[in-house]
Amino acid sequence: MPRDGTDDILVLANEPNASLPNVFRMDTTTGRKSLKTQDGPPNVVHWISDRKGVVRAAVSDESSLASRVWWRPAEDAKWVQLAEFRLGDSRFEPIAFDGDGTLIVWSNIGRDTAAIFR
């Protein structure tokens, strides 16, 4: 839920592509929703928003052969690819943003277990 004083919520829906999720901001009073991921990277399977409800990180999947991690500093900024991982590679993936907007990830790079990093 965006922390901006509204009753709006963020929802996932497989629209307009039935096989991939998109993020919509929905007004809980009227039911109207607006697409928040229209200019996002292709083939995204996981979106991450910050505490203000801005979608700022994503993980895309290329037919399970590779996944890509994406990030942007603000809602009106361009998406930047941070990494690409092949099937079976050690990797990191975004899981959240903390209160000051720092990206939090899990990673197993250089480890035999996964850990959480800022």
Image: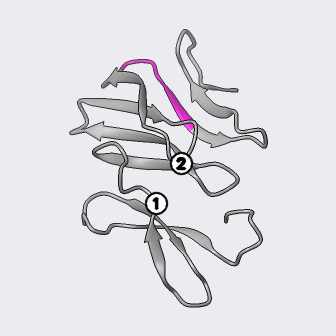
Asked if the residues shown at circle 2 and circle 1 are in contact, with their CB atoms under 8 angstroms apart, the answer is: yes
SS for tag 2? loop
Residue at the spot x=64%, y=48% of the render?
A: 50
Q: Nearer the viewer, residue 50 or 74?
A: 74
Q: Is residue 18 left or right of residue 104?
A: left
For this rendering, which residue is in front, 24 or 95? 24
- Which residue appears farthest toward the bottom when viewing the image? 30
Q: Quadrant of the C terminus?
A: top right
Question: Residue 51, relative to residue 98: is it above or below?
Answer: below
Q: Please name the residue that numbered disc 2 is placed on.
A: 75
Quarter of the image with the N terminus in it:
bottom right
Residue occupying the point 70% across, 33% down = 102
Query: Label 1, on which residue?
Result: 36
| Nearest to N terminus: mark 2 or mark 1 | 1
Q: What element carries label 1?
A: loop
Q: How far apart are marks 2 and 1 (CA)?
A: 9 Å
Crowd around label 2: few <14 · some 14–19 · many ≥20 (10 Å):
few
Quadrant housing residue 19:
bottom left
Q: Is residue 63 left or right of residue 97?
A: left
